[in-house]
Image (cartoon, rainbow, N blue to C red):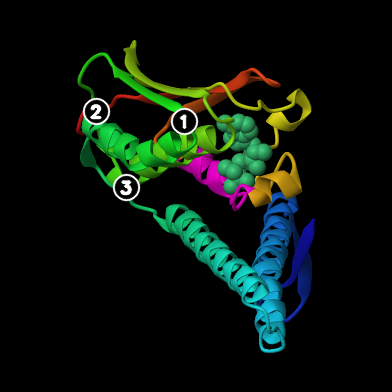
Amino acid sequence: IRIKSAEIYGERVTKVGTVVVLEDITDLKKLEKMRSQFVANVSHELKTPLTSIKGFSETLKFVKDDETRNKFLDIINDESERLTRLINDILTLSTIEQTKTAKHEEIDVAKETEQVYHLLLPKAESKNITLNLTQKEPILLYGDRDNYKQLILNLVDNAIKYTKESGEVRIQLDKQENNLRLVIEDTGVGIPEKHISRIFERFYRVDKARDRAMGGTGLGLAIVKHIVLSMGGTIDVVSEIGVGTRFTILIPIRSLE
Ligand code: ADP
């Protein structure tokens, strides 16, 4: 609680009383704590690849054999790519957070989803994963087109990432009452029950080492949640270890106001 007080004086400089304002700043404090936690996490996440890049590049000049040199160069390249992904995700998150006036672009759901599908198809094929897209009817949404694409991209990218070779990833789009229903389903590793409530937190990973090795930044689902909420929607997850995961998103279809 923050206390502010002021003394009140009458006409002849006689004190007539004191006003005390008690302000509940619990939420403010919580927000401040979350912010500084986020900054600490960001710094840590950025430092890890930087430390590798510095270490390997410094050692490189003492390495004589080509095989080891190439190995080191690959590590430096991978870690630079990780840094780029991290910075991009941090910027995306901060842009979504700061945008006060929501865009009202027309989103042709089928067209935009198909673009993401084609973008990720090579990644699925490289793991021999079947990527399926079914859309029953044309749907128009009004909102931020880039955000909509980012939402699909992050979910389908995760589905491919956390599914083993020869698995299957399905994207389904349809209308449910006055909502767009988007289902992204995989036959992947699944998410343990006790982690489900936390996967939308920034930098939260179920298995730190495994998920980092997969190339993730730990920000993908935080971005997804932000976008869904900004569109007035909801997101639901059902998962079973070793069987797969299903994300269901409902976004209200609003007409142009
Ligand atoms: P990351 O960049 O590490 O993938 P995300 O925020 O996208 O981070 O996801 C958070 C965590 O949730 C991941 O690290 C992973 O453990 C888990 N996860 C997300 N999507 C899936 C999925 N389709 N199947 C299994 N686990 C998943």
Instruction: Residue lying at the far top in this picture: please name it.
Output: 177
CA gap, disc 2 and disc 3: 14 Å
Comparing 71 with 97, the one in front is 71
Name the residue carrying label 1. Answer: 128
Is residue 47 in view from this perspective? yes
Q: How crowded is mark 1: few (under 14 residues within 10 Å), some or many (20 or more)?
A: some
Task: Estimate the x, y position of residue 73 in percent, counting from the top left.
Answer: 59, 73
Is residue 225 covered in magenta? Answer: yes
Q: Residues within 10 Å of mark 2 (few under 14, many from 20)?
A: some
Task: Estimate the x, y position of residue 5 in percent, counting from the top left.
Answer: 76, 67
Task: Estimate the x, y position of residue 107 in percent, counting from the top left.
Answer: 23, 36
Q: Which mark is residue 146?
A: 3
Location of residue 215 with respect to 195 vertically, above or below: below
Number of residue marks = 3
For ligand 1, which image quadrant applies?
top right
Name the residue carrying label 2. Answer: 110
Residue 176 location, quadrant: top left
Question: Where does the C terminus fall, quadrant-wise?
Answer: top left
Question: Where does the N terminus fall, quadrant-wise?
Answer: bottom right
Task: Estimate the x, y position of residue 149 in percent, counting from the top left.
Answer: 34, 41
SS state under label 2: helix
Q: What residue type is labelled 3?
A: Asp
SS state under label 1: loop
Q: Taking 211 as reference, is 168 left or right?
A: left
Location of residue 9 with respect to 22 vertically, above or below: below
Q: Which residue is painted at 77% across and 61% down in the image?
A: 2
Q: Which amino acid does label 1 sit on?
A: Asn
Q: Which amino acid does label 2 sit on?
A: Ala
The answer to whether the residue labelled 1 contacts the one labelled 3, judged by CB atoms less than 8 Å apart, is: no
Span of residues in magenta: 214-227
